[in-house]
Amino acid sequence: MTGRPFNMENKFDVIVIGAGASGLAAAIEAARAGASVLVLEKNHVPGRKLLSTGSGKCNFSNLEIKPSAYHPPRPAFLKKVFSSLPPAEVLSFFKELGLLWTEREKGRLFPRSLKAQDIANLLLNQLELLKVRIQTLTEARSVSMENGSFLVEAEKTAPKWDKSASPAQKAIFRAGRLILAAGGAAYPQIGGGSGGYRILRELGHAVAEISPAVVPLRIKGNFVKEMEGVRLDAVLTLRTENSFLAKTAGELLFTSYGISGPAVLDLSRAALSALAEGPAFIEADFFPDYKTPELERLLAERAASFSGRPFRHFTCGLLNGKVIRAAAARAGIDWDAPALPGCAPGLAAALKSFTLEAAGSLGFEDAMVTAGGCALSEVNPQDFASRKIKGLYVTGELLDLDGDSGGYNLHLAWTSGILAGRSAGRKQPA
Ligand SMILES: Cc1cc2nc3c(=O)[nH]c(=O)nc-3n(C[C@H](O)[C@H](O)[C@H](O)COP(=O)(O)OP(=O)(O)OC[C@H]3O[C@@H](n4cnc5c(N)ncnc54)[C@H](O)[C@@H]3O)c2cc1C
């Protein structure tokens, strides 16, 4: 290998590739089990993606961890995972680190401080106590085997902002066990990439095709631009031309390209798979707390009491003005004409069933998670050890298992990391 070597010890019991959620948890458990551990991280700081989770608040788990929150459906695999490490034990892991947490809607758990940085710091403080070495700005490029050991070829790069730094240095690190915790392809701006999948393939693992999941959607038509910035609660129904597919409720956000927000992210996986087969539609109900006849009555009575005044006066205070205007346009109502009770049925229909046609996703750049990855049939659910290569472990988002939004993805990252770390860190028979 060319390049100057790192000035450091390069032989360890366990190497962890990736200082993200699963890698940091794995390194803690491996070190607690008595192993010497090296963590390689390509970013300039460990846990960079963690800091962005839950909009900086980190929805780190959920009170109701259930197999049905994960895709594709793998209930048997997940049942074994959650009986090997019950969800309550993941919370105990964090309690021991010193975390206090708080519950939000739908069982979502956040640090009490609502700061993702606290979760990252608790993990990093523990690693400091355990004297685990974290080598940042160091990217694992390839992995090979020699006499039962793993050889990791890595490259140490300079931070992007340091123009005077010396050229990349290369080195080989050696370990008896390797935990591949390199994460998925989502959010390349903060460390996402497909390098982990490439290493898995090179090692002979089957990798299911990857695609963005939990992702904002692009919508057909220009009108969404007029609604850019609108944020409101709605019930969303996903359907094709012939059938109903799924329903979500929560915040909906209109952006320059389409729609986002928790209600959309929860629907995105089903919307994209429907779109792969044909047209897919999302119907937004902006008045879910009113049945259609009730809303018609409300609008008709209101129009009567605003008699003679322009329609725009009648709508002021009903709902976000941009939404009403778009619904009125769909109902063929003249914005400047006088409000008439006869407009009620058309307007109620447009507000109860505001149809948007999906055009695709925003891609990995804006996706929270990666669907696809390492075949679960090749991984032991009790410790995430590879069934193909002795001493190799695969954790977190690299697995062909992605969760709904709500803390499920991080929960899986902690669970797989803890189980893999415990197993990899155990003294191996000579
Ligand atoms: C914006 C955003 C918000 C999110 N919010 C939530 C949330 O609130 N709740 C939730 O449950 N999930 C959330 N997720 C998803 C969650 O963050 C991931 O599922 C989880 O972090 C996956 O953990 P991981 O250990 O597999 O990978 P990561 O946490 O992504 O860590 C992988 C690490 O490996 C490093 N790496 C990659 N390749 C190499 C290499 N070759 N050499 C060295 N280092 C390498 C990366 O830089 C990264 O630090 C969010 C995701 C995003 C993008």
Image (cartoon, rainbow, N blue to C red):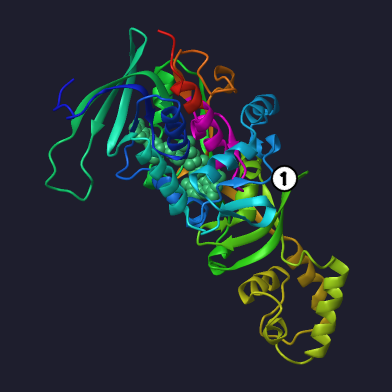
* Horizontal arrangement in the rendering, residue 11 relative to residue 178 (left or right): left
The reply to whether residue 35 is in sight is yes
Q: Give the quadrant of residue 18.
A: top left
Crowd band around label 1 with a 10 angstrom C-alpha radius: few (<14), some (14–19), many (20+): some
The reply to whether residue 184 is in sight is no
Write the start and end of the magenta stretch as one range: 394-419
Which quarter of the frame holds ligand 1?
Answer: top left
Of 426 and 140, nearer the camera is 426
Residue 426: give x, y in percent of width and height.
46, 20
396 falls in the magenta region:
yes
Residue 423: give x, y in percent of width and height.
50, 22
Which residue bears the numbered disc 1?
240
422 falls in the magenta region:
no
The quadrant the C terminus occupies is: top left
* Horizontal arrangement in the rendering, residue 22 relative to residue 71 (left or right): left
Q: Residue at x 67, y 59 (%)?
A: 250
* For residue 272, above or below residue 321: above
The quadrant the N terminus occupies is: top left
Of 332 and 76, nearer the camera is 76
Q: Residue at x 52, y 53 (%)?
A: 54
Q: Give the quadrant of residue 325.
A: bottom right
Of 59 and 278, nearer the camera is 59
* Horizontal arrangement in the rendering, residue 97 relative to residue 316 (left or right): left
What element does badge 1 sit on?
loop
Amino acid beneath label 1: Thr
